[in-house]
């Protein structure tokens, strides 16, 4: 009998992430640095799987989306045209007493510091640009000042002509990119939810202004809903919030925020927006270069409309971790209770897909057989060989979300069969050696 435990806390997630090698604070031996994290051996694979899943559905399985990978540092004029230099601000408030710093829009009142409780200690809100700066070249003067990109999208816009001409694409078509972005967030926090260096997966989908643009936008909203559902995010913890006209930027014709119910409340994972011709127009105006589309067949020249989906890969990875987390009480046949922590990852997302163990670590024939099986499966699934106390091996694999564990025992030596144990039900199947690859392929 299995009883579901209560919802996970961020303390539990952070502790598990550290203990099992998913996520560590960056530069921890020097005391860490606020808003930066490192992905450990399992976390790096988890995040890669999340990105691969996005890439597979958004690029590889479609014939209307092409790949892109632009530089992090771009010509500084890019950020003038995009509006980031003039308007990518948060309002910053300091407490004169405890010296803590807040985003004004995160405070319920400016009367009293939420940390030290002092009345009248907060400064007036002032603008703080979130772009990180750097210098390019040997001279540190204002002419060499550039920015680390705060979003990946602009690399696609400035290359629009290069892309459609070289890829021989015509709207409707999309350009996708996954890459690092940087924002000097005033108050990073909630683990990897709000960080200063993060990865975005962005799709810029260009469509003609032929009256079908809103349908196209709706299709992308549906496609993204399907993606979260396909990779197992619980539907009751996900919502697609449609922005009102007042909530959207003036140029946007529609917008949806994809939000997940985190332990601290709803938080944005992705924004999907119909941005009109705003971005291409802005770059044409400042650069003086033509980024409109010329249709050879009809001889028509126009600026395409843009549907954008911008998802945070760190936030999505964190969501996968939180959504998969379960702490349950198991009652065995004799009525004895025990607890187990299990990450119920989708098999495609799980960093390890099969754990392979010998029944006893001191029996060389079992060890050799298990190691040989692990080597044979390695090209096909993500495997991990381990040995030790059987109960502990299962608990460890449950805690890192491995969907299947394979046990090599004495019967394996006799007839080639192995025991396959399922993470979620903890049920075990006896599977023939020849049938194993097919058995796993079907389920992974
Ligand atoms: P927020 O309101 O949470 O600051 P935003 O509306 O500024 O986010 P966008 O500019 O729409 O975010 O960026 C698209 C996506 O990039 C977000 O939905 C999020 O997943 C991710 N993202 C943005 N800022 C951060 C950050 N500081 N840390 C991690 N991911 C981020």
Image (cartoon, rainbow, N blue to C red):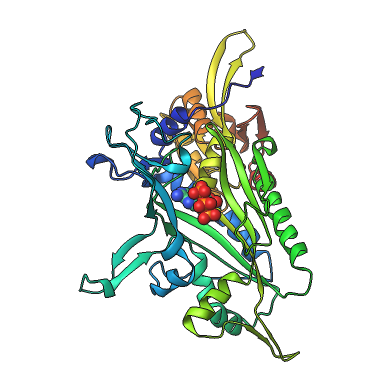
Above or below residue 86? Residue 13 is above
Residue 122 location, quadrant = top left
Q: In this view, does 298 lie to the left or right of 58?
A: right
Above or below residue 100? Residue 184 is below
The x and y percentages for residue 327 are: 55, 24
The x and y percentages for residue 439 are: 68, 43
The x and y percentages for residue 120 are: 34, 32
Q: Could you tell me which quadrant the N terminus lies in?
A: top right
The residue shown at (69%, 35%) is 236
The residue shown at (43%, 64%) is 86
Q: Is residue 47 left or right of residue 420?
A: left
Above or below residue 295? Residue 82 is above
The x and y percentages for residue 242 are: 69, 49
Q: How many labels does the image show?
A: 0
Residue 272 location, quadrant = bottom right
Q: Which of 417 and 205 is in front in this view?
A: 205
């Amino acid at each position: 009998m299995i009883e579901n435990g209560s919802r996970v806390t961020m303390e539990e997630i952070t502790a598990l992430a550290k203990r099992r090698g998913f996520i560590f604070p960056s530069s921890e031996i020097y005391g860490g640095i606020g808003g930066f994290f490192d992905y450990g051996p399992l976390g790096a694979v988890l995040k890669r799987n999340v990105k691969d899943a996005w890439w597979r559905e958004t690029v590889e399985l479609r014939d209307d989306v092409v790949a892109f990978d632009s530089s992090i540092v771009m010509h500084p004029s890019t950020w003038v045209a995009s509006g980031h230099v003039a308007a990518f601000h948060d309002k910053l408030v300091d407490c004169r007493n405890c010296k803590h710093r807040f985003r004004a829009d995160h405070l319920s009142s400016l009367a009293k510091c939420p940390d030290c409780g002092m009345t009248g200690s907060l400064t007036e809100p002032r603008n703080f640009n979130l772009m990180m700066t750097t210098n390019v070249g040997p001279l540190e003067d204002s002419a060499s000042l550039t920015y680390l990109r705060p979003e990946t999208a602009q690399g696609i816009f400035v290359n629009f002509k290069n892309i459609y001409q070289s890829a021989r694409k015509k709207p409707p078509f999309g350009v996708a990119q996954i890459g690092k972005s940087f924002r000097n967030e005033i108050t990073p926090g909630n683990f990897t939810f709000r960080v200063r260096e993060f990865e975005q997966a962005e799709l810029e989908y260009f469509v003609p202004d032929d009256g079908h643009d809103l349908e196209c936008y709706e299709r992308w909203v549906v496609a993204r809903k399907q993606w979260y559902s396909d990779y197992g995010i619980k539907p009751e913890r996900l919502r697609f919030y449609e922005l009102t006209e007042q909530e959207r930027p003036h140029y946007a014709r529609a917008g949806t925020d994809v939000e997940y119910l985190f332990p601290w409340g709803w938080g944005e994972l992705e924004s999907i927006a119909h941005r009109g011709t705003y971005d291409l127009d802005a770059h044409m105006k400042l650069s003086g270069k033509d980024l409109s589309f010329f249709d050879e067949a009809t001889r028509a020249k126009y600026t395409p409309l843009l549907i954008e989906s911008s998802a945070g890969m760190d936030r999505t990875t964190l969501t996968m971790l939180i959504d998969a987390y379960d702490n349950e009480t198991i009652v065995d046949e004799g009525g004895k209770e025990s607890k187990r922590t299990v990450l119920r990852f989708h098999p495609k997302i799980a960093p390890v897909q099969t754990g392979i163990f010998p029944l006893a670590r001191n029996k060389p024939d079992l060890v050799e057989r298990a190691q040989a099986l692990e080597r044979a499966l390695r090209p096909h699934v993500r495997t991990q060989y381990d040995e030790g106390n059987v109960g502990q091996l299962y608990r460890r694999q449950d805690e890192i979300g491995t969907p299947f564990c394979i046990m090599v025992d004495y019967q394996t030596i006799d007839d080639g069969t192995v025991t396959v144990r399922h993470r979620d039900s903890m049920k075990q199947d006896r599977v023939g050696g020849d049938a194993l690859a097919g058995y796993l392929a079907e389920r992974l």
